[in-house]
Image (cartoon, helix red, strand yellow):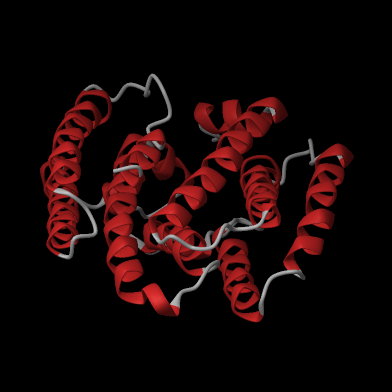
């Protein structure tokens, strides 16, 4: 049985394109914010273009093409889907060769993880062990945003703290999304963290991740990387955000009125 949510997202190409376009805008935006935090020399336009192209391709591949691989349906992916991927891959490959070796190695690693994470058959390699999927996604985002471009060595300590802080919030958010989609995951046979623990335990884990993030934010204030005002503002935003998630996701189980990943932009701006 194919969940209705998957049909509505993956069967219709327009919805897959819409979702892919959102993240193709979000990831370069986050990368721009990270670049401002560490005061790098301005990243070239090719970096942002490459990030946008590959992000769009990755999400479109997952939502439109992998769906057909998984179910082996008669309605296979159309020629236009592959043409679109090829049109994205060719300029992305050109930009890839302009990056230094360090960036190329990290990007190649992310590609391997992404291909292993996506489904090409009836078996989900990274989705049969609880929490592996969440860590995989968060690790890819953190590596791309904090360790792929720019001068890593001169800002390593600061970069490490910021990236771990961001990782905690990403992990908390991914667990929340898993809980929202728990029935769909069960129909797939995916073994998610959210399907193995009671709601009370899940909420406790998420709260702990938010608290750990705040502890790191306090350390940033101590190191004069941020002001007390930034810390206070973030604390208030965390409170409202957690209440919002609890209301729309954990309690009522309804869909979000907007994509909550916008919260990541707000977080990096403080």
User: Measured from the top left, where is residue 194 in percent x and y?
Assistant: 28, 48
Q: In which quarter of the image is the N terminus?
A: top right
User: Measured from the top left, where is residue 119 in percent x and y?
Assistant: 60, 56
Residue located at (58% from left, 62% from top): 114
Residue located at (30% from left, 74% from top): 157
**Residue 185 appears in the picture as rendered:** yes
Could you tell whether 183 is left or right of 240 in the image?
right
Could you tell whether 210 is left or right of 180 in the image?
left
User: Measured from the top left, where is residue 32 in percent x and y?
Assistant: 51, 49
Residue 129 vertical placement versus 83 (above, below): below
Residue 110 vertical placement versus 250 (above, below): below
Residue 230: image quadrant is: top left
Residue located at (78% from left, 49% from top): 88
Q: In which quarter of the image is the C terminus?
A: top left
Could you tell whether 174 is left or right of 52 in the image?
left
Residue 131 vertical placement versus 152 (above, below): above
Q: In the image shown, does 62 or 223 lie closer to the viewer?
A: 223
Q: In the image shown, does 28 or 259 lie closer to the viewer?
A: 28
Residue located at (17% from left, 29% from top): 243
User: Measured from the top left, where is residue 53 in percent x and y?
Assistant: 70, 48
Tally of numbered discs: 0
**Residue 130 appears in the picture as rendered:** no
Q: In the image shown, does 126 or 147 lie closer to the viewer?
A: 147
Residue 242: image quadrant is: top left
């Amino acid at each position: 049985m194919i969940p209705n949510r998957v049909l509505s997202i993956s069967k219709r190409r327009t919805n897959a394109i819409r979702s892919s376009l959102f993240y193709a805008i979000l990831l370069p935006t986050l990368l721009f914010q990270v670049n401002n935090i560490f005061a790098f020399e301005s990243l070239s336009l090719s970096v942002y273009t490459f990030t946008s192209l590959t992000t769009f391709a990755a999400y479109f591949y997952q939502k439109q093409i992998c769906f057909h691989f998984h179910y082996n349906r008669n309605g296979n992916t159309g020629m236009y889907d592959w043409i679109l991927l090829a049109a994205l891959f060719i300029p992305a490959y050109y930009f890839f060769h302009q990056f230094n070796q360090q960036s190329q190695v990290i990007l190649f690693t992310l590609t391997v993880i992404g291909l292993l994470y996506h489904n090409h058959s009836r078996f989900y390699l990274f989705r049969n062990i609880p929490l592996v999927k969440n860590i995989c996604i968060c690790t890819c985002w953190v590596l791309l945003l904090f360790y792929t471009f720019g001068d890593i060595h001169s800002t390593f300590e600061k970069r490490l703290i910021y990236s771990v802080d961001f990782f905690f919030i990403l992990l908390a958010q991914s667990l929340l999304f898993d809980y929202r989609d728990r029935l769909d995951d069960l129909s797939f046979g995916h073994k998610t963290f959210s399907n193995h623990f009671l709601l009370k335990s899940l909420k406790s884990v998420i709260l702990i991740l938010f608290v750990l993030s705040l502890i790191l934010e306090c350390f940033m204030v101590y190191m004069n990387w941020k002001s007390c005002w930034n810390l206070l503002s973030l604390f208030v935003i965390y409170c409202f955000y957690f209440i919002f998630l609890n209301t729309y996701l954990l309690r009522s189980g309804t869909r979000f009125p907007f994509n909550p990943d916008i919260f990541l932009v707000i977080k990096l701006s403080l």
